Amino acid sequence: MQQSAVPELAHTHTRPIHWLATATAVAGVVAFSSVLQPNSATAAQAAGPETKHAAAVLTPPDPARADFPLECGPVKAIVVKKATGDLDGDGSPETVAVVHCDSPMGTPPDGVYVLTHAKAAAAPRLVATLIDPKDNITVSDIAVRDGAVNASLLGYSSDDVPRCCPDVKDSAKWQWKNGAFVRSTPAGAHSV
């Protein structure tokens, strides 16, 4: 083995005093940095005279807390599907709930309801019925896209068709216009 041409330097060996000095310096930096924290970040910008005030409520209404106009007898009404989004352009989301009676057999018809927020502690407020259960329709899919409610619907061509086996497939779209939900049928609607 070849000897180094440079003599060993005494200050390159670590001693306990070096570790103690390093730990003290790190603790000092951590303590000092906790004093110099920046202000909390917020997602909202400061409001100026030209700024519109956004709705204070940004969570969608919970359909489990709503009262639906269903007569279910001894069974209860259950929410089977839901979709959320801002339907009226006010910046606060609404919930569209597909609800039917929890029937032990058969295919109970669905009701489709739009919920919005009520006062802070109150249950959500029902603002529209898009499909009444009396229409004998089952909703296979529902979504809120671009401020509109889109649904795939299953129904029956006559009273002779068994309630287990819908034979009509349709689609519908509802949009908020002039203070009410207006239904239109997209171009792809068809019967089975």
Image: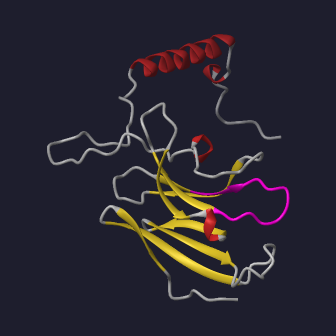
Q: What's the colour scheme? A: secondary structure
Residue 18 lies left or right of residue 174; in this view the side is right
Q: Is residue 39 above or below residue 124?
A: above
Horizontal side of residue 184 vs 134, given as left or right:
left
Q: Quadrant of the N terminus?
A: top right
Where is residue 189 shown, x and y percent of the image? 57, 86
Q: Quadrant of residue 14?
A: top right
Of residues 167 and 37, which is closer to you in this image?
A: 167
Out of 36 and 12, give the one closest to the viewer.
36
User: Residue 128 in the image: x percent, y percent?
Assistant: 46, 57
Q: Residue at x 45, y 20 (%)?
A: 34
Examine the structure image and report whether residue 100 is included in the region drawn in magenta.
yes
Residue positioned 53% across, 71% down in the render: 150
Q: Which residues are magenta?
A: 97-110
Q: Looking at the image, is 72 positioned above or below residue 177? A: above
Q: In the rendering, at what x and y percent does residue 15 appear?
A: 68, 14
Question: Which of the 4 image quarters holds residue 136?
Answer: bottom right
In this rendered view, identify the residue nearer to me: 66 or 132.
Answer: 132
Residue 71 versus residue 41 in the image, above or below: below
Q: Position of residue 130 (x, y in %)?
A: 51, 64
At a point 69% along the width and 85% down the height, the residue shown is: 157
Q: Is residue 101 one of those drawn in magenta?
A: yes
